[in-house]
Amino acid sequence: MPNDLSDSYHFHVMRRAIDAIDAQDQPMSLDQLADTMGMSPAHFQRLFSQWVGVSPKRYQQYLTLDHARRLLADRFTVLETSLATNLSGTGRLHDLFLRWEAMSPGDYAMGGAGLTIRWGWFESPFGPALVMGTEKGICGIGFLSETTEAAAMQDLTSRWPKARFVADAEMLRPWVKTAFGAAKTNDKAPVYMIGAPFQIKVWEALMRIPSGHVTTYSEIAAAIGHPRAVRAVGTAVGRNPVSWLIPCHRALRKSGALGGYHWGLPVKRALLAWEGARADHETPLATG
């Protein structure tokens, strides 16, 4: 792996804590969690709170199995209203830090022919990430915590088989910093959506879900004018190449079940828990 990617220390502490929490039937105390992490309670509490903005005790509430059901009950977003009024999500991320455009259907049909896609490895709040982009914006983000570098690279490059891929982390770095909340400017992170027309409609609907909120696959299907195409919507959600920025993790089953996630359900749970906590406690992201 290129030297650009160092160990995501904060993330790995979080992942170990999440794994420890998942292994227990009851919430763990601060002392128990700190002991599991091999840290003093004060140090663990400080690091944990710096990363997510809330205490370990509070954060555990966002990782319980019924958290998704509570989200559906308390922060359910009716996408038809947002689409009808041409409004994006009210979350800070998508109102202030994103702009997006889509590749034309004709260009997409060419499989990326004539397109140069830059790529690089980066540290993110959710672990190592492979980021890809064209001169128009970020077109791919994959998380590595549940897969390998080779598999992530194969996954994203296979989506545009005729494109030219060039390692160029420096070109992408300003966009990546903005995408993960580490930029000190008011620049927006550009997203360039490369997909079939139906997929683009689904992804645009996803980007109208406010941060900290969720919706269902059936709501997305209705919002894009294909109420019977719930299964096709689910497939399009799963094929989203730009994880996090096109927030497919905010799509749940009608029952409240998480459903699948391309980069692993532990990552989806971490994304939802982080956003849920941030929505309740607006503190800046610690980038480590």
Image: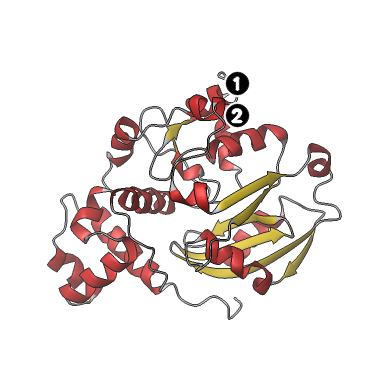
From this view, report whether residue 126 is shown above or below residue 41. above
> Percent x, y for residue 211?
42, 45
Would residue 192 appear left or right of 271 to someone viewing this image?
right
| Up-down relation of residue 24 to residue 121 (above or below) | above
Q: Is residue 147 above or below residue 91?
A: below
Can I make out residue 148 in this image? no
Q: Residues within 10 Å of mark 2 (few under 14, many from 20)?
A: some
Question: Dot 1, crowdedness within 10 Å: few (<14), some or many (≥20)?
Answer: some
Asked if marks 2 and 1 touch (Cβ < 8 Å), the reply is yes
Q: Residue at x 80, y 47 (%)?
A: 111
User: For numbered disc 1, what is the local secondary structure?
Assistant: loop
Q: Is residue 226 left or right of residue 76?
A: right
Whether residue 73 appears in this view of the structure is yes
| Residue 270 on image: x %, y % | 38, 54
Quick one: quadrant of the C terminus? bottom left
Residue found 61% across the figure and 62% down from its top: 131
Residue 103 at x, y percent in the picture: 75, 44
Which residue position holds label 1?
Answer: 226
The amino acid marked with disc number 1 is His
Residue hosting label 2: 232
Q: Nearer the viewer, mark 2 or mark 1?
A: 1
- Give the residue type at disc 2: Ala
Q: Is residue 222 left or right of residue 161?
A: left
Q: Report the residue at 69% width, 45% height from top.
A: 101
